[in-house]
Amino acid sequence: MTVEVDLKEIKELLFSLNRKIDMLIEDRETLALMMSSEKSLKGFLEDEPDIYSVNDIRVRYH
């Protein structure tokens, strides 16, 4: 193998790793936003009446 071929392989591997790291960071950011939304809405939704009971959901999705 030549140096050029080795460098090309290394660049491809680095590109692949960078893409995977970007995806992981994006997933973590999404999870953080979801958790933040859940915490901020929890107090608001606790006082709201339930529209459906657990039994309603079981009948619909079982």
Image (cartoon, rainbow, N blue to C red):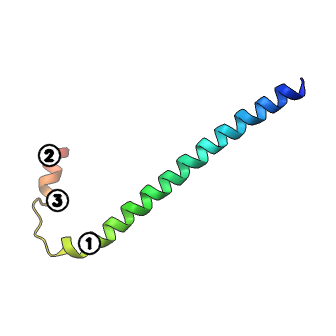
Disc 2 residue type (three-letter) = Arg
- Does 9 sit left or right of 53 as displayed? right
- At x 64%, y 44%, the residue is 18
Residue 7 location, quadrant:
top right
- At x 66%, y 38%, the residue is 15
Q: Which residue is mark 3?
A: 54
Mark 2 element type = helix
How far apart, in angstroms, are the residues tagged by discs 2 and 3? Answer: 10 Å
Question: Which is more toward the observer, 56 or 1?
Answer: 1
- At x 11%, y 59%, the residue is 52
Q: Which residue is mark 2?
A: 60
Mark nearer the N terminus (2 vs 3): 3
Residue 20 to residue 4: above or below: below
Mark nearer the N terminus (3 vs 1): 1
Residue 28 to residue 62: above or below: below
Residue 9 location, quadrant:
top right
User: Would you call the spot at circle 2 few (<14 residues within 10 Å), some (14-19), or many (20 or more)?
Assistant: few
State if disc 3 and disc 2 touch (CB < 8 Å).
no
State if disc 1 and disc 3 touch (CB < 8 Å).
no
Front of the two marks 3 and 1: 1
